Image (spheres, helix red, strand yellow):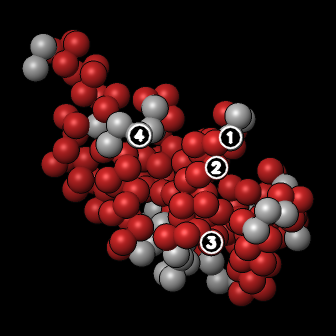
Amino acid sequence: MRKFLGTFPIYSSGTNDSVKEEARKRFNAWKGGDHAALPPSLRRVVFGIVLSEADASDEDYNAVLATSKSSQSADAKEIALAAIGDVTSPRLIQKTIDLIFSDEILAQDIHGPCNSLSANPKTRNRWWEEMQKNWRFVPPLKQHIDTQYHL
């Protein structure tokens, strides 16, 4: 399983149904409390596969997001925040964008979902439009711009 889930081409193409099924099975077990079912080395890939499904649920999204808020590990927080940018459903795309423009994500962590949205072919253009429209309101940028340019 690690051999397959850990490879970027399979993850990015999203065409291998057996990998998706295994990812979903492990994710559901992890979400149910069996953390051994989803070792840390597989979480970024599995979170990404699950959240990139067209029918990804708010429950799945919130479970990943909760990891970013409750984990003591900086790596776990980064993995979770990057994964929420892999979404493809319009509802979860908007939820991620709203989260980025809020002050809920610390400045040092905001790069995760931003990078993932910009790398995601289903969200890239929408994210670019939002950035152009709201660039002054991205919390880390706003603080820097206000300080540097007295706007």
Q: Quadrant of residue 6?
A: bottom right
Per the model, the C-alpha gap separating discs 1 and 3 is 20 Å
| Position in image of residue 55 (x %, y %) | 51, 82
Per the model, the C-alpha gap separating discs 1 and 4 is 15 Å
* Above or below, 15 relative to 42: below
- Residue, disc 1: 71
| Position in image of residue 105 (x %, y %) | 44, 38
SS state under label 4? loop
Q: The residue under label 2 is which amino acid type?
A: Thr
SS state under label 2? helix
SS state under label 3? helix
Viewer-nearest of discs 3 and 4 = 4
**Farthest left residue in view:** 151
- Residue, disc 4: 104
**Residue 124 makes an appearance in the image:** no
Mark 2–mark 3 CB contact (< 8 Å):
no
Per the model, the C-alpha gap separating discs 2 and 4 is 14 Å
Per the model, the C-alpha gap separating discs 1 and 2 is 6 Å
